[in-house]
Image (spheres, rainbow, N blue to C red):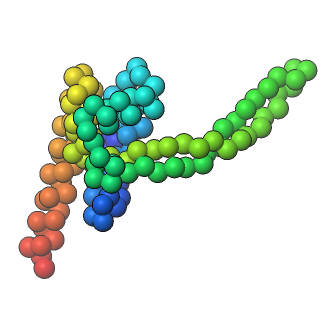
Amino acid sequence: MKLIPVTNRTIGNHTVQTVNSRELHSFLESKQEFAHWIKNRIAQYGFAENIDYVIVENLSMINLSSANNDQISSKARPQKRIDYFVTLSCAKELAMVERTAKGREARLYFIECEQRLLANLKDRSQNQ
């Protein structure tokens, strides 16, 4: 089962499994705007940058369309997008505090991801 992509990232000199909190926010179907949601959760639950999450700034292109004499012209302009990649522990807590069926589903999924990782590490150490 793959609800939300889990990727490896370096946080605080350690490679850990992370989740893009923007994708988590979307999965949870939160009604809050993403930027407010993540900033409020970080402050409310005391998450620490480079321990619980890392910030990645990306430039993405946004298409702007305007009608001109029944002809649509498209222009693109760059916009800075800030993504927060959170550890699985942080993602579990974010999912849990939503107190919804989607939050519970996400939390159980992250627990399953951790269990698979631990099983893989155990298998590797036994094979060496």
- Measured as percent of width and height from the top left, residue 48 is found at 29, 46
Name the side, left or right, on which 13 lies relative to 39: left
Farthest-out residue, bottom: 128
In the foreground, 114 or 78: 78
Farthest-out residue, left: 126
Identify the image quadrant of residue 91.
top left
Name the side, left or right, on which 19 lies relative to 103: right
- Measured as percent of width and height from the top left, residue 117 is found at 19, 57
Q: Give the residue drawn at x 54%, y 42%.
A: 81
**Is 127 situated above or below 113?**
below
Number of numbered markers: 0
- Measured as percent of width and height from the top left, residue 6 is found at 33, 50
Q: Give the residue drawn at x 45%, y 32%.
A: 35
Name the side, left or right, on which 29 lies relative to 61: left
In the foreground, 29 or 90: 90
**Is 31 situated above or below 21?**
above
Identify the image quadrant of residue 42.
top left
Residue 5 visible to an observer of this rendering: no
Q: Give the residue drawn at x 42%, y 49%.
A: 55
Name the side, left or right, on which 116 lies relative to 38: left
**Is 40 situated above or below 15?**
above
- Measured as percent of width and height from the top left, residue 86 is found at 32, 46
Q: Give the residue drawn at x 78%, y 35%.
A: 74
In the foreground, 91 or 73: 91
Q: Quadrant of the C terminus?
A: bottom left
Q: Quadrant of the N terminus?
A: top left
Residue 67 visible to an observer of this rendering: yes
Identify the image quadrant of residue 21.
top left
